[in-house]
Each structure stands twice: as C-alpha cells, then as structure tokens.
Amino acid sequence: MHLQPVVRDSATAAFFDGTARGVFLLRRSVVSGEVVTPSAVQDSAGNTDLEWFEASGRGRVVSWAFVPRRVAGSDRPLELTIGLVQLDEGPWWWTQLVDIDRAAVAQGLRVRAVFPKSGPGESDEYVPVFTPDETGA
Amino acid sequence: MNQRSRASRSPAIAGLGMTELGRVYGKTGSQFAAEAVRLAVADAGLRLSDVDGLLVSAGVANDVGLGLQVDLNLRDLRLLSQMQAFGSTAGAMVQVASMAVEAGMAEVVVCVFGDAPLQEGVGAGHAYSDGHRTHSGWAGLQRSTGAVTPNVLYSLAARRHMLEYGTTSEQFGAIAVAQREWAVLNPLAQMRSPITIEDHQRSRIVSDPFHLFDCCLVSNGGIAVVVTTVERARDLKQPLVHILGWAQSHPGTRLRRNDDFGLVTGAAQSGPAAMAMAGVTTDDIDIVEIYDCYTYTALVTLEDYGFCGKGEGGEFVSTPGNLGPDGKLKMNTGGGQLSSYYMWGMTPLSEAILQARGHAGARQQERHELIMVSGNGGILDHHSTLIVGS
C-alpha cells in the first residue's frame, strides 16, 4: 500500500469525518432516495437537498490496473493495484486495492473499505482503500 | 465534391504551420504557439495583418492564452477565445472557426496549440505526472490512493474492454506495430525504427495492461491551422482543404458510474453526426486520423465510428492486411501520436491536412478526398470529429 497525504476542504469535511471513524459515507437525495457519489451536489433530477448516510463500505471490482511506482527515497520498486469499485449502493469509486495477491484480482471480486491514515501529519486524513471481503456473499 | 463545398462561404483550411516537434528545448508553449501561427499564415500566403480571428489552446504547460494576440501584434480581432476540452480541442477550434467564417463573423481564423511538457534532462514520464505535495479535497483524495494520471485511468478503461470483449494486449500491439510502419515513411516522426509485436510485449509495463508502446509520445512544439472561406482559399498558396462535417460529444460521466466506461465512448455519437453533416458514411472515408493517446483509444474509436463492429476491434486491427501502409484501412498515416508527435488533437489534424493536399510524400495516399479526424479529451470525456477533404 502506498498513499499520499490529503487534507480536507469544506466540500470533503463531512466525508473525512466519516473515514476518521471508519465509516464510508455516501449521499442520498432527500426527495427521491437516489444514492449519489459523495462529491455530487445534486441528484440526477436536479434536486440539491442531499443527506449523508452510512454506507456498507462494500462493493465489487469493475476494473483494475497494476501500476509500477518508484517511491522517492527508496530503491525498492513498488507495484500498486488501482481499482475501480462498484459500491453495493450503486456509485463507482476509484481507489487502491490493498492486501491482495495479483492473481486474486478479478472482475466481480467482493471487496470492503478499510481506512488508513494518508500521511503522518496531524491534518492528513483517513482515506478509503479496498481489500478482499471474505465475509459477505 | 458535395453541395456544401460549393457554397462560397463554406469553410476551408488554407494554412498549416508546424514548428520543430519533439525534444526541442528553450521555448515555452506560448513561444511555440506564436511561431506556429507565423508559419501557418506564411504557408497560406497571407500576412499576420490578414488574420481577424484567433483561437488558442494550451497543453499541460498551460501557458497559451489570450496574450498570444498581443505577442503577435494582431489588432482588431473579430474573434478571440481560449478553448480547452483537452485532446478534442483542436477539432473544436476548427469547428468554431468554420462556423465563424460561414456566418461572416470573420474571414481568416487561426487555430493554434502549443506546449512544452518536456524539460531537458527530465524523463518524459514526468510530464503528465503529479508532484509530491499534499493535496486537498476530492481531487486530493483520488490522488492520495493513486487513482490518477491518464496512463492509469485509461488502462482501467482498456481492461474493461478486454474483460467484456476478450481484447488482448497483443491486439493493442498490432496497432503500435502498424503505426510505426507509417512513421518509418514520415520525416516528421520522432520514432522511425520498425517494431514487432514482441518488442511491444517486451516494452516495460507503464500501467498494466499498458506497455510503453501502448502509450503516445510526449512532445514540445506548436501547430496552427488557418481557416478561411473556400472562396478566399482558392486564391491562396496551398491546395485547399474543405471542412465538410463536424460534431462533438461529451458523455458527462467523468468519475461517475458509467456502464459504458471503456466499452462505448463519445465517438459513437460524434462520428455518425459528423458523417451525417458531410453526407457520407464510413464506406466513403478514404483515410482516418484517429486520436491515439493509447493503442486502445484508436481501437475503441474505430469501433464507435463504425469501421468495425462493437467488440470486434481487436480482431479487426490484428487481421493481416487491415492496418499499415499496405492495409485496407488507412489509419494514422503519419504514425499517429504513438510514433510521430504528440500535439494533442493537432496530430491527427495536421496529417489529415498533409494527405488532403497531396503533400504527404512517401506515405501519400492516392485517395484523399474524404478524411475523418478524431479528437479525445480527458479520460474519454470529450470527443470531437471533423470530416475534411480535397
């Protein structure tokens, strides 16, 4: 796993409050109940009254890439697994897949979110990355 | 020649200016852009004082703006705008210029792109990467987990195509090999030694499934084109290039769930729309210049434009006799962005103009009456299509 630090802004504050307590928050239209991605400002019909709710943090792998990376200050080459995950509630999430063998990555693989801290600084937020979910169906 | 091209205010390309391209140092994107404008205007047999419209677009250096007007001492412009839809912008600029001259808003509109992503002594891979500073907000979150850069995000799209249709890496390689064959014939190309599928497979992994030879070049330089009326262009220096049809498509699904992601792109709407405007079908197209930031991009665009069936692109490009200088489909006749030069949407457009004029030298095609040009921006977020011809 390799992360880079991220800090919050006003748009992401609530989401990072969730990740800090190990919860994946999503947004939902108060009018229609449609679930939208956390960065959305309206539902597909244009309603802007959205509420936060605790999502399952679970999903399935849609696509992935194995990305060689050289980390500054290290001789050891790294390989990241970048994943595109379809959350059970609907939205897609671009992320990193961790604690997973290359051979195990597959379309439809069940995964769940874990929330490591993105950096050592006090303001560095906790971020969702995904790992195989052995628990669910 | 169709009805559209007989109308006197129909748009035409009358000038093409290309600076030295590739690993050229010591100039900013803006300086390259200014040089390209001067070259294009001279190519047309015009003077800068004849220019009354200017459309500018920047690359990653993001330094080509409205100030270019003053750099070139252009006075009293009737059209001036900075446009940005990334790789689809070159096509979009020509479209706006075409509509401006058709409407009588302007007579001579220059469209220009310039960029200087390469720095001396620094690897090309750094040009499109992120720095290592702390980021914030949603963009920062995505960067935090590494789901960033065109190489990574496009490779997610390519893998989706592979999962759904069985497209293989070797099939992507067939595109790389064929385009290098064209580049061998192109004195303007940066990469002119032939490659094999084995070379493609052995080239280092950039973002699996992409090898190095799946990815386009990075280049410094500038390219400009002059758009005017057919009537005006007839009196100028070069064989005129008619602008016969155009369209754009922007799916609006960036970083949102899109069940078509990687499978069907904006090309599926833009291509047919442009062909409809020109009154042609794929059977009429002599040459196709496809935005090939990746081998995969060219493949999926061919499918979406209708040169082969959806999901059949891998089979189509790897069937002997389809691609390459001796192939049935004349695609990316200069080597494309993969092998010639990467000036975003100006790469396919510039080669289309050279072919349409009959100025493509050893790679010149006998049939060059209808040429289809694609542009791709973002991660399959912005598409433009032009139909040009002689």
Image (cartoon, coloured by chain):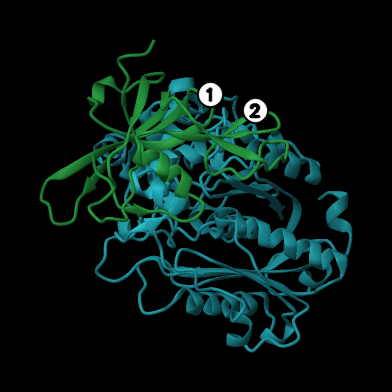
Chain colours: A green, B cyan
Q: Nearer the viewer, residue A73 or B376?
A: A73
**Rendered image: mark on residue B216:** none
In percent of width and height, residue A111 lies at 36, 23
In percent of width and height, residue B332 lies at 52, 47
In percent of width and height, residue B18 lies at 52, 70
Which chain is mark 2 on? A
* Amino acid type, mark 1: Glu
Mark 2–mark 1 contact, CB under 8 Å?
Answer: no
Q: Quadrant of residue B145?
A: top left
Residue B203 visible: yes
**How many numbered discs?**
2
Q: Which residue is mark 2?
A: A33
Judged by depth in the image, the label closer to the viewer, 2 or 1, is: 2
Q: Quadrant of residue A44?
A: top right
Q: Which residue is mark 1?
A: B312
Residue B335 visible: no
Which chain is mark 1 on? B
* Amino acid type, mark 2: Gly
Q: Is residue B135 above or below residue A59?
A: below
Q: Residue at x 41, y 45 (%)?
A: A16
- Crowding near pointer 2: few (<14 within 10 Å), some, many (20+)? few
- Disc 2 is placed on an element classified as loop
- List the single residue furthest toward the left: A75
Q: Nearer the viewer, residue B261 or B162?
A: B261
Q: Residue at x 41, y 46 (%)?
A: B142
- Crowding near pointer 1: few (<14 within 10 Å), some, many (20+)? some
In the rendered view, does B42 fall on the left or right side of B334? right
Q: Residue at x 27, y 61 (%)?
A: B123
Q: Nearer the viewer, residue A96 or B304?
A: A96
